[in-house]
Image: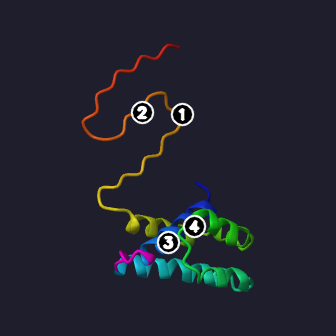
């Protein structure tokens, strides 16, 4: 996941939690912190700052709306911004949710109580 995709996913998750009424204090505070960091980076881009004020639950729309601006100001490489985005994603995940990253795999089992038999030739 690129930095832009991470930021867009976090903004969408924060917006979605806010619009569904399930946002707790941690979500509201973390969402506000991420948006504050982004506003500080986007001071020379008023259109992007204005877009931050619209609660958009679709990450693709965030990418379309401010992705180029975030790249231009280096927000997609800023570790403070990326850490805030990761934290927001963490606090908006439901309890028990797992995120699994799989690379260069031939057989994958995710979850509890699974039994699988794999035979790989080569």
- Marks 4 and 1, how far apart in space? 25 Å
- Mark 4, secondary structure of its residue: helix
Q: Which residue is mark 2?
A: 108
Comes first in the chain, label 1 or label 3:
3
Tell me whether circle 2 and circle 3 mark residues in contact (CB < 8 Å).
no
Q: Which residue is mark 3?
A: 84
Comes first in the chain, label 4 or label 1:
4
- Marks 2 and 3, how far apart in space? 30 Å
Which x, y percent locates residue 100?
43, 47
Comes first in the chain, label 4 or label 3:
4
Residue 77 visible: no
Above or below, 8 against 25 in this view is above
Q: Which residue is mark 1?
A: 104
- Mark 3, secondary structure of its residue: helix
Q: Which residue is mark 4?
A: 7
Tell me whether circle 4 and circle 1 mark residues in contact (CB < 8 Å).
no
Q: Residue at x 57, y 67 (%)?
A: 7
Which of 1 and 116 lies nearest the eye of the viewer?
116
Q: Main secondary structure of the magenta part?
A: loop
Which of 82 and 90 lies nearest the eye of the viewer?
90
Question: From this viewpoint, which residue is outermost toward the left?
Answer: 113
- Marks 4 and 2, how far apart in space? 28 Å
Classify mark 4: residues with Cα within 10 Å, few (<14), some (14-19) or many (20+).
many
Q: Nearer the viewer, mark 4 or mark 3?
A: 4
Which x, y percent locates residue 48?
69, 79
Which x, y percent locates residue 106?
48, 27
Tell me whether circle 1 and circle 2 mark residues in contact (CB < 8 Å).
no
Which x, y percent locates residue 33?
49, 81
Residue 117 visible: yes
Q: Nearer the viewer, mark 4 or mark 1?
A: 4
């Amino acid at each position: 996941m690129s930095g832009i995709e991470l930021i867009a996913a976090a903004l969408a998750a924060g917006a979605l939690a806010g619009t569904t009424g399930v946002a707790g204090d941690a979500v509201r505070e973390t969402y506000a912190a991420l948006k504050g960091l982004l506003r500080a980076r986007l001071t020379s881009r008023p259109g992007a700052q204005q877009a931050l004020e619209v609660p958009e639950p679709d990450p693709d729309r965030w990418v379309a709306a401010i992705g180029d601006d975030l790249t231009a100001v280096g927000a997609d490489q800023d570790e403070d911004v990326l850490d805030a985005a990761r934290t927001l994603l963490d606090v908006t995940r439901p309890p028990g949710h797992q995120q699994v990253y799989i690379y260069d795999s031939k057989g994958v089992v995710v979850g509890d109580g699974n039994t699988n038999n794999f035979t790989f030739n080569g």
